[in-house]
Amino acid sequence: MRTRVYVLFSALVAVSIVPFPPAEAAAGRCGSVAVRPWCDRSLSPAKRTALLLKAMSRPEKLDMLAGDDLFGAALSETSAVHREGTLNGVPRLGVPGLRIVGGGAMGVHQGPMTALPSGLALGASFSTAAATGNAAINAVEARHRGNDILLGPAVDIMRTPAAGRAFESFGEDPYLTSRLAVSWIEEVQRGGMIAQVKHFPANNQETDRYSTNAVISQRALREIYLPPFEAAVREAGAGSVMCGYNLVNGKASCASRVLLDTVLRKEWRFRGPVVTDWIAGMKDTGTTVRDGADLEMPIGIHYTAGNLLQAVDNGQATWADIDRRLGATLRMMFRFGLFERAPRANDGKIDYAAHAVKNRRLAEQGITLLKNKDGVLPLERGTRVAVIGKPAAEFRSATGSAYVRPRSHVTPLTALRARGGVTYADGTDLGEAAATARAAKVAIVFVADHREEGEDLACLSLRCGDEELGDQDALVRAVAAANENTIVVMETGGPVLTPWATSVKGVVEAWYPGAQGGPALARVLYGDVDPGGRLPVTFPVRAGDAIMPAGKGRISYAEGVQVGYRRYDAGKLPVRYPFGHGLSYTSFRMSGLKTSGSRVSFTVKNTGRRTGYAVPQLYVRLPGSGQPVQLKGFTKFSLKPGRSRRVVFTLDARSVSTWAGKWKAARGCVAIGVGASSRDLPLKGRLCR
């Protein structure tokens, strides 16, 4: 796979890097309350912070406003594995250091670890339980590798399907993203880690990401891009927030008074630190220290002692401003007990074998069956199967800071071969691929794209998705012409074009399924388990219907709130596979819709012959012209054949409100739709206020 260096070293030429002290010297238990009154655990984090700030010298304060190592502290003297960030403490006062590691839906980025399915795979699970399970693995592995803060989750909305980091997101919908984010953050923080939700806000493309100015209406910000962050802070109690690289409405994300000070701190009452993305641009030091980021990472560029002192001397900032910035970090550290516990070590107490089993189950929950003509799936045991395509024999993931090197992995080809009757062709020779497919009863073509941090896709076609794989659309057509029972398995980091969809019998989206994606796919394809996924994104028919990344400078979010499926619905545009879509190996019927007050209830029955996952979804449309259809409820459960379950959704005030300078509840009747996707809503009704 291609690799890319993302850090702009040219910006660091004048920065000197001072070696950091060992973690043991920079951290420890707080100490005696008589000597250090801020060690009194009966006091609130705010009061403890105030006492500590009074005891700190000015140089000590300045030193704690920026990280202390460009690449992160080594795990040990003999280890080549590094953390992503280090903030030294103040041993004189018992202030511990902070150890920060990259993390998120795909796992902990710290050497060979459990490589989990991508963020979009977790989004496709439509399951808060899956989010909790994913987070539990992250928390355990990060904690036992000696870390304090986990850099995740990434809750940026997938505005453009070509986004290089689309795979990290939970999808195109703010409600789905919010619900998964809350469950993920709560579990990570129950597990002893501090979550850092990112990238605040509207970090939606990689093209010119350091300089783009996203110009977004207040309504779109409030209804689309801010809700996941608001839920992360106000509901889940996220310990920290990461600001992004881009500008929003003319202001650097890490120096925006409106977004950071007014919305985040005052309106949402966030009390933890805002931390810069690695070498994110701010503005000038004085402006930023007054209203912007609290902690600059991974080292000081704006927040060096010299720059900070100059800002104070020039009257651009005050020592009270510096106390506010540092106070946010200290409050977080008191809140999460860092002053009381011993420094963490890389103790090796991780059950990787148990995590591998859980990892496979997580992948199964995200694998999405998009087409299943004539019941070509599940496969029968003993079926002669031709497996075609290089991705079948590879561990597929993305490049960049989210990449997790798997401790071990099982490819789809290995897992399918274990079932017997499998032949393989890598697809580089179309004639060989067709011949291999022709000799089998069923042909499975594996295709993939390549996503990476720092670069958006040039196009959505699999003809140009990965130069190493060549024209994969041509490969699919060649195989489909040779075998009428062709199934395509896609391992992609976002929506792609599928011009061959009508020519094949089966289509499966596996996303980047993680280290256990092979066994998970085999179990789904052979029907050991029902495909658990539903689309968290829309697959377009035509590239021209999708929003694509813009060039340098000002980017107008002219579509407003019409993002994702809202855009396709508003324009009455055809889609290949709609948001929320996903098939089961059984069938379900929804009936008995009732609305009362703020409650919507209905019955789901398994009308098929197999146990399967039902994922009923609730959509609303507020009264008034131009209002989009919006997801406002979902649940997921397994049902045995013939069994039924009554489902109840309750709509809160926000669910029926729009932003017009403040949240304003709709008057009149709200249209209700319940079904299996944004375009499959057999139950319709109204809620009238």
Image (cartoon, rainbow, N blue to C red):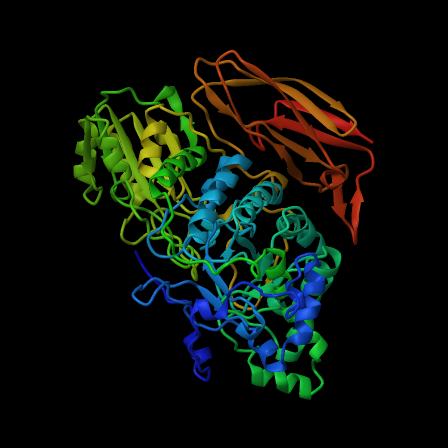
* The C terminus sits in image quarter: top right
Question: Where residue 182 appears, x then y in whole percent?
Answer: 60, 44
Question: Where residue 13 appears, x then y in whole percent?
Answer: 43, 82
Decide which of 335, 282 is in the foreground and name it.
335
61 relative position to 522: left or right: right
Instruction: Identify the residue at horizontal 63%, vertical 76% (top origin).
Output: 56
Which of the 4 image quarters holds residue 521?
top left
Decide which of 268, 580 is in the foreground and name it.
268
470 relative position to 307: left or right: left
Question: Where residue 667 appears, x then y in whole percent?
Answer: 83, 37
Question: Where residue 80 appears, x then y in whole percent?
Answer: 31, 64
Determine if residue 105 is in view. no
Number of on-image labels: 0
Instruction: Identify the residue at horizontal 21%, vertical 45% (top origin).
Output: 428
* The N terminus sits in image quarter: bottom left
559 relative position to 685: left or right: left
Q: Is residue 411 above or below residue 313?
A: above
Which of the 4 image quarters holds residue 625?
top right
Decide which of 660, 16 is in the foreground and name it.
16
Which of the 4 image quarters holds residue 48?
bottom right
Q: Is residue 254 above or below residue 366?
A: below
Determine if residue 116 is in view. yes
In the rendered image, the residue lying farthest to the top is 642
